[in-house]
Structures are given as structure tokens and as C-alpha cells.
Image: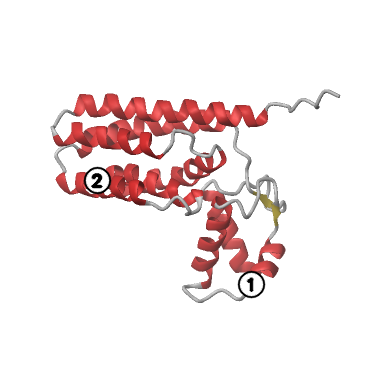
Amino acid sequence: MGRLETVSVTTSLIATMRAEILDGKLTPGRGLSENEVAAEYEVSRPTARVAITQLVLEGLLRREGRQQPARVPQLAAADVADLFLVRIPLELEAVELVAGRAEAHETAGRAVDDLRAIDESRPHSDFVEADLRFHRALVDGIGSPRLSAHYERLTGEIHLSMVQSRSVLGRERIAAEHEAVLDALRLGDVEQAQVRMRAHLAGARDAMMAALAKDREPRRAPVA
């Protein structure tokens, strides 16, 4: 690979590795030591160390110990259940707090439009990012830096779980359910917006868990 452009180099490396994990170019289970990252991306070991540490914090890499290589996790149904255990109450609270904030509704509405407009030839991770922009817009619309930072720490694993399960709800259903949440918010019906958000997130959770559980089922040998 060629030398990375200076953004800083560390920022560029993190962004490059993040994209390669989410696009599946860095496959689940692959070991990534500081030396390997430094050699492959033509950066220093300290830069590689910072990038690995940041991606571990984002949930896109896991490392058992400081001397062990980091690995892209293969998420399981239990990981999705645990993520949504945190995500659902957080987003339901966000729906209540963002009620009456027209600017946040407009930002979320643009995210719905972007989701519907994204070209089908784009990488699957781009579709997932467009989906997550809607949810991030509602959380960020509250105006709480700490809440936004907390949610951002979840989105790496949320994104990865959606990519690995192939985000099974489909574009039209996701866009329609996002729009339904927004419609209720615009009408000032917080209770209905929360009901719709809960149903949307629970449906996504259940479909993703089923897809990941199916992937883990042992494959039967063909019958001769």
C-alpha cells in the first residue's frame, strides 16, 4: 500500500482501517499487531499503536492483552442483544428529549432522504452509515456533548453488527420506519414516536440476531 496522506497520519490511518473493517477488507479473526500495521500502512509503530487503541475503544477491534495482536471481532447474536440492551433505552430517551427541536427533525429528515437516494452499487457499509445518520441526528439534536460521545462509542459496534448481519430489514422498511418516527415527532406525539422507535429497534435487533445465529449454525455435509 502507498504512504498515507498527512491529515494527520494517525487520523488518516484510523479512518482507513475503520473503513477497511466495515467494508470487510480486514476480515473477522485476522490478527493485527503493531508491527504488522506499521509495515502494511507504512507508518511508525507509535502511530500504529494509537490507531489500534482507538479502534479497540470503538469496538471495531478486540485485544485480549497489550502483548496480543488485536483482532476484528466476529459478532454473535449475544453481542447484538447486549448492544441493544444499551441502545434502546438511550434512543427512547433521545426521542423524548429531542421533541420540539425542529432543527434536529430537519437533520434527521435529510438523513432519511439520503438513505433513500444512496446508489445500490455503493458498499454495504455506506448504506449502514446512511441509516445510522438518522439515529445520530436525533441524539446529537439534544445538544448534550456527553450523551453524543456515549452514543458515538456504541456506533462502531452497531455499524459492525449491521454489516456482519447484512442489515436484514432492507432500505425501504428502514426509511419508512424512520419517517414514521419523524412524523410523530413533528406532530408533537412523543409517546407514539417512542412506540415507533421501540418497534423499529426491536425489529432490527431480532432480525440481526436471527441472521447472526444462522451464520453460526454448523453446516451439514452434503448427502452422497
User: Disc 2 to disc 1, how far (Cα)?
Assistant: 42 Å
Q: Position of residue 159 (x, y in %)?
A: 48, 44
Q: Decide if residue 201 is on the left or right side of residue 125.
A: left
Q: Secondary structure at mark 2?
A: helix
Quarter of the image where the N terminus is located:
bottom right
Q: How is the image coloured?
A: secondary structure
Residue 51 appears left or right of 71: left
Crowding around mark 1 (Cα neighbors within 10 Å: few <14, some 14 to 19, many 20+) is: some
For image coordinates 59% across by 31% down, the residue present is 212
Query: Eyeballing the image, is 76 above or below 6?
Result: above
For the residue marked with disc 1, what is the amino acid? Ser
Q: Residue at x 56, y 30 (%)?
A: 211
Residue 176 position by quadrant: top left
- Mark 2 belongs to which amino acid? Gly
Residue positioned 15% across, 36% down in the render: 186
Could you tell me if the residues under marks 2 and 1 are in contact, i.e. CB atoms within 8 Å?
no
Q: Which residue is mark 1?
A: 44
Q: Secondary structure at mark 1?
A: loop
Q: Is residue 122 left or right of residue 135?
A: right
Q: Residue furthest right?
A: 224
Q: Report the residue marked by disc 2.
A: 109
Mark found first going from the N terminus, 2 or 1: 1
Image location (x, y in percent) of residue 134? 32, 44
Residue 181 horizontal/vertical position (percent): 26, 33
User: 6 or 179: nearer the eye?
Assistant: 179
